[in-house]
Amino acid sequence: MKPVETPPTRIISGNDGAVNTGEGSQYNDASVHHGTGDINHHHYFSGSAEAARFAMDDRGRLRRPRTVVASQRLEELRAHYVAPTGYDEEKRRRELEEHGVLVLTGPPGVGKRTCAQLTLVPKGSEGLVDLREVQVEVDPRPTLDAGEIQEGERLMVELIGLTCSVSELRTSLVSLVSQAQNVKARLILLAEEEDVRDLPDELRERSVTLRRPHGTKVLYRHLVRYGLLPDHRHESTALPMELPLLPGPVVEWLGRASMSEIEGLARRAGEDHQSEGGRVGLGERLERALGQGHPAADKAVAEAEAEGRGRAILLAAAFLEGAELDRHSAAVERLLPIVRTPEDETPPLERAGFTKEIARVGVTLDEERRIGFSSPGYGRAVREAFWDSYPHLQGEFAAWIDTCLDDPGLSPVDRDAVAERWAGQALRAQRLEELFERVYKWSFEHGPQAALLLSSILEDTRHGGAARQQIYRWARTEALPGATAYVLVAVCSEVLVTTHPDQALVRLHHLAGNKDPDAAAAARSALLRLAEDPFLYRRLLRRVSNKLAGPDRRNRPIDGDLFEDLTTPARLVDGPRPQARRPDVGAWTRAGLPVVLFRDAAAASRYCERLLEHPGALADILARWLVTAAMDSGRLSSLYAAALRWASGGESGSRRSRADALLRHIDAAQGLDLSPRPLA
């Protein structure tokens, strides 16, 4: 697939804001989709505007802030994890300690990514051990962006879903393995089975092929999570009695489904249970959530009446399921000319009533005048039947979806549902380029739905890698329109960060240099919000410091701004585990600080004032770092003058004593007399 080019014609500011794309399950508020059917989030059926996944704030920006806690995410993964059959986690961890590298491979859906994360981070160490993903970037050429590897660091590289061949990365892989082994780091590579032969000999020897976990056990864990079964893990029985009685279609499906697809089935069944209660048994509920039991959908599409009008009513109902009757009727009228249905010359009042028309094709109407179907999953079956029966009309269907989003009477929740249902079918039909084009187009008028569409592609097993690469290309385009940049900010900070945090930070970092100042500010704000997580904080500080002082140094003002944001006294010395005590944080801070002071003469004054105004005792470690950086950058006199100026700015004796403490550090650095001096 050729990349989608970004038309650099105009810059339009608009919206701001903030799944599992690998194998394994995602455990957070965002939903998961890896199968070939539609994505059905429970958010979209409550009829409440507050349930929209991405919402616009009063400044026209996309916002749905959520704190991502890396350690908590790993703990949740562990809680619902079922290891691949025969996988000995402790044995593989010992091999990692001995050889420094491990390659995990196996068929799609076995949980390679989750397995790698939990092998690198032992149980109980989720809040103590950092895990960093080394990214594969293919623009402008295939490379591994590893940077400097720290001693004992845990690293992961995903060589799955690449838009380049693994053989193009051989040299980079050899170098990465050598660096990791030299500093006793632990490195796990994830590779497709057919790509293992293209790896260097040393890596092929360290490869382990994973086998599928027991699908029924995985389903049980998630049924417990979504409240459909009691938790029996504390009892001697491994599985509850209900599971051997699963319907045949579910059992057959479990044998081929990915781990995240199984999680999605349990989630949908849980949503069905919440909406309907306990009126049906577990087996029937799972079968309905799977979308089985609707063989009549193809027949209904074929037999819909009135020269295509009945089919238009059925298709519109399948996409607007849950919407008000008036919106459905309007969508039908817009669809008919798009698919070139001959106009009905019968006078409107002489035609059958619309409620009778919808009843003829199996569409129901509830007490709130919302349309739907009597059987859960039937709407999805109808959508798939239409897409498979009329592949030559998929372009026209997409144009009609545009008109649905333009309907001002459609609620945000229903608009989301329409967009996401179309995404599910377009992904089934492999219409990836068309999806990316819609993301760009919708970003100007329908930012929330553009973000939702891009999220759907990210969450798809086959296309998640292509989506990440497209986001990367867009993010690196400084002239990217602000409206599109806002969508990327939202998706990176809401969705991508939950599965690929390093990639999310890289893309947000590029977006922070966007030429649209509001979009750049949104990306910067998202980065700092994510940096509240201590692990993400260290990853971002490392990257920014390397950009300032490392071998790939650049002269982007945003790098200095972010570095100042990340090295405030509050971030470095506050909290029960101050970041400044960590050797790596100290090294990155000391490396970037002289560059920032040298570039900006006023930076010394700003750092001085922040340090002296920070409550509590003067942080001596920060004072020493600041004085050393000022000497190295030739800004010591500026720092000295700033301290004197700050001391004279108030009558407080403590103000003068704090400044005097910093001045003593300056004197010590110059080898001068350390006796107290009066402050004028």
Image: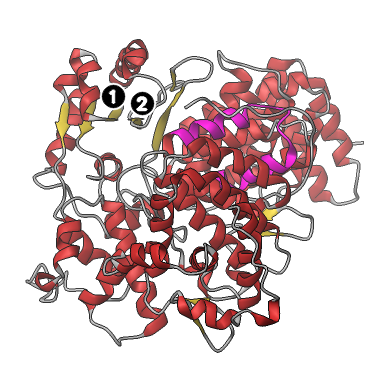
User: How many other residues sit within 10 Å of disc 1, few (<14), some (14-19) or many (≥20)?
Assistant: many
Residue assigned mark 1? 184
Say whether residue 577 is visible.
no
* Residue type at tag 1: Lys
Q: Are marks 2 and 1 in contact (CB under 8 Å)?
A: yes
- Image spot of residue 348 (x, y percent): 69, 77
404 lies above or below 455: below
The structure residue drawn at horizontal position 53% and vertical position 32%, both measured from the top left corner, is: 470
The structure residue drawn at horizontal position 68% and vertical position 20%, both measured from the top left corner, is: 595
User: On the picture, is 608 further left or further right than 447?
Assistant: right
478 lies above or below 370: above
- Image spot of residue 304 (x, y percent): 45, 68
- Label 2, label 1: how many angstroms apart (C-alpha)? 6 Å
In the image, 63 versus 265, the foreground residue is 265
Residue 472, magenta (yes or no) = yes
The disc label shown at residue 151, or none: 2
Magenta stretch prevailing secondary structure: helix
User: SS class of the residue under badge 2?
Assistant: loop
User: SS class of the residue under badge 1?
Assistant: loop
Quadrant occupied by the C terminus: top right
* Chosen colour scheme: secondary structure
- Image spot of residue 296 (x, y percent): 31, 68
The structure residue drawn at horizontal position 19% and vertical position 64%, both measured from the top left corner, is: 250
In the image, 132 versus 62, the foreground residue is 62
User: On the picture, is 168 further left or further right than 196?
Assistant: right
User: How many other residues sit within 10 Å of disc 2, few (<14), some (14-19) or many (≥20)?
Assistant: some
Q: Which residues fall within the magenta stretch?
A: 466-493
Residue 88, magenta (yes or no) = no
In the image, 130 versus 252, the foreground residue is 252
- Image spot of residue 160 (x, y percent): 33, 31
